Image (cartoon, rainbow, N blue to C red):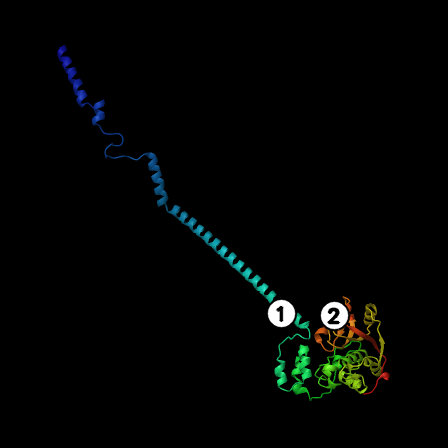
Amino acid sequence: MEGNGRARGEGRSRSTQSGGRSGPARQGGGQPQGRRQAGGYQPQRRSEQRTSGVRRAAAGSWPDRLEVEQRRAQERKEQERRRRLKLRRKRKARIRKALVLFTAALFGIALFLGIRLVKNWTAEPGKKEEKIDIEKLAEKEEYPESLLKLLEKNPETKDFVMNYPKNKDRHVDIDVSKEVTQGKIPLFLQWDERWGYETYGDDFLALTGCGPTCLSMVRCGLSGDSSWNPYKTARMAENSGYYVSGSGSSWDLMTQGASELGLLYEEVIFDEEHIKAALEAGTPIICVVGPGDFTDSGHFLVLTGVDEDGKIILNDPNSKIRSKEAWDINQLMGQIKNLWAYSYQGPEGEQNE
């Protein structure tokens, strides 16, 4: 009995070890709980499953894709706005630069023209504003030599000289009434075409008539009577013997000749104080000058006033340009030989032509 029971127990024990469902045998031949080591099914970890799920959601979700596209569109808009703003700034900078250059160019042109204009105004008699071939004019035999010399010395006389052939024989009634106002000394030019082609002494009044022209200015300005124009005054001077052949007008024209026109005269003390005092009192002065700024021989001028800077205002019968300038008194006194101040006494002292 004991032997059979042991045998049965041992038999159960062996069958359990070789074919049972528990113990080491189950581990060797049962169903695996994790990944297989050799090519079988391998389940993903939970963290990997979550990551891949998010990726699928981001890639596949329509609202998310729309938001991304909108953001990208806004970024493109912003970039385009900045690009356009940058272009506008560059364009404005170019425009400003162009305006600056244009303004500078205009200023340069204006400065250049202004300098040329000033040079023309202040040109010396021997300098030519426009080159004229005087030799060719001389070959035409239409122009007297003395007029060509006048043109060579004084370019202001260009029109006067060039018009000589057509105007030399024309005699017109001279009317200077529009230029005369009592109390203001007018500027008459000895080479004015109304009387410059007429003769005075040895040559044209345009060359020899500075004395009568100055006396005419003073007579017309003080009296307001325009009848004593330069031509009429020159006729009186020549007829009365105040022209000296080869020299021009005598100084006596400014004293005795002035009296014949109803003018009172007195010699002015030759210093700055007395000269300026006479001019500031409204008294015109005729002066005779030697070689210098106005002539290379002798010449008459009319001093008419003093400007706010203390410079002398004058009428030069041979130059519009010099008549527009104001002159330093000391510069003039270095050239003045004599001078006379005038007032008007009335027609009773006049000499009829």
- Label 2, residues with CA under 10 Å away: few <14, some 14-19, many ≥20: some
Residue 117 x, y percent position in the rendering: 65, 71
Residue furthest to the top in view is: 2
Q: Secondary structure at mark 1?
A: helix
Say which quadrant the N terminus sits in.
Answer: top left
Location of residue 229 by image quarter: bottom right
Residue 226 x, y percent position in the rendering: 78, 82
- Label 1, residues with CA under 10 Å away: few <14, some 14-19, many ≥20: few
Q: Amino acid at mark 1?
A: Leu
What residue did someone put label 1 on? Answer: 113
Q: Which mark is residue 153?
A: none
Residue 252 x, y percent position in the rendering: 82, 81
Q: Earlier in the sequence, mark 2 or mark 1?
A: 1
Against 64, residue 155 (above or below) is: below
| Near-viewer residue (280 or 98) | 280
What separation in Å lies between label 2 and label 1 (alpha carbons)? 22 Å
Q: Secondary structure at mark 2?
A: strand
Does the rendering let one see residue 22?
Answer: no
Does the rendering let one see residue 159?
Answer: yes
What residue did someone put label 2 on? Answer: 326
Q: How many marks?
A: 2
Say which quadrant the C terminus sits in.
Answer: bottom right
Location of residue 240 by image quarter: bottom right
Mark 2 and mark 1 residues within 8 Å of each other at the beta carbon: no
Q: Residue at x 62, y 82 (%)?
A: 135
- Left/right placement of residue 153 relative to residue 300 reads left
Against 279, residue 206 (above or below) is: below
